[in-house]
Image: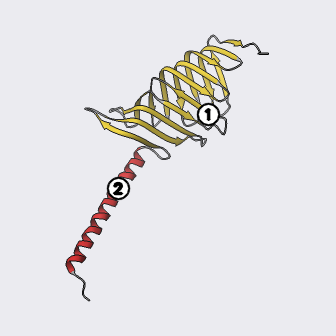
Amino acid sequence: MASDPTHHSRRVRRLRQAMLVTALALLVLVLLWSSFGSGTWFDARVTSGPAQAEMIDAVMRGRNQQGQPYILRAQVLRKRPETKSTYDMQAPDIEIGTRRAKDLIQAQAQSGVYDQQMQTITLSGTVELRQTGNRTIRAPHVDFNMQNGDFMVQGPLQMESPARLITADLLNSTAENKTHEFTNGVITLFAKEQK
């Protein structure tokens, strides 16, 4: 039984088309992966404006140098045209660490800037930062170093916990030493014990 040469040609043509589509899909995947750095990835709806592209409801996940997971969400993430790795954010929401390890930091703000190359996030506007142990920090400006987990809060700031209220102009927090250093006019008020 001889095979039909036209049937064989159609089958070869379909296989070539399938291979081309697969190769293009893999190329796009590799380019997207390399453009967002190793260990991080974005999930968003992408739109483009007159001068720049923006991501709506963006979600970025990754791990810092200590292996802590982090999630960065933003209602709008817009790449600055003059840079390769800096993004402006509207309504950013950040999580660093895990609840299980009791080292979770969550932060929300009106706006922010994410520098992917430097692995830093600057939050501004009304910033609220929550830490394990029912500590809440409110301030107009917070700088995060995503690689080592350190952050700096520029005030006037308030840090509330069940036992005290601290107000200051500046707070430096180190993840490695798990320390908070307050400067410039610190006031501490201890809450009365409840009976």
Q: Residue furthest right?
A: 195
Checking the image for residue 25, the label placed there is 2
The location of residue 69, given as percent across then percent down, is 57, 41
Residue shown at the point (48%, 27%) measured from the top left: 122
Q: What type is the residue that disc 1 sits on?
A: Leu
Residue that lies at the very extreme toward the bottom in this rendered image:
1
- Looking at the rendering, which quadrant does residue 96 occupy? top right
Left/right of residue 169 with respect to residue 21 in the rendered view: right
Q: Secondary structure at mark 2?
A: helix
Give the CA separation, mark 1 to mark 2: 37 Å
Q: Dividing the image into 4 quarters, which one contains the N terminus?
A: bottom left
- Amino acid type at mark 2: Ala
- Mark 2 crowd level (few <14, some 14–19, many ≥20, 10 Å Cα): few
Q: Residue at x 52, y 32 (%)?
A: 94
Describe the element under mark 1 as helix, strand or loop. loop
In the rendered image, residue 175, in percent from the top left (x then y), is placed at 63, 32
Q: Which residue is most to the left?
A: 6
Total numbered circles: 2
Residue topped by disc 1: 104
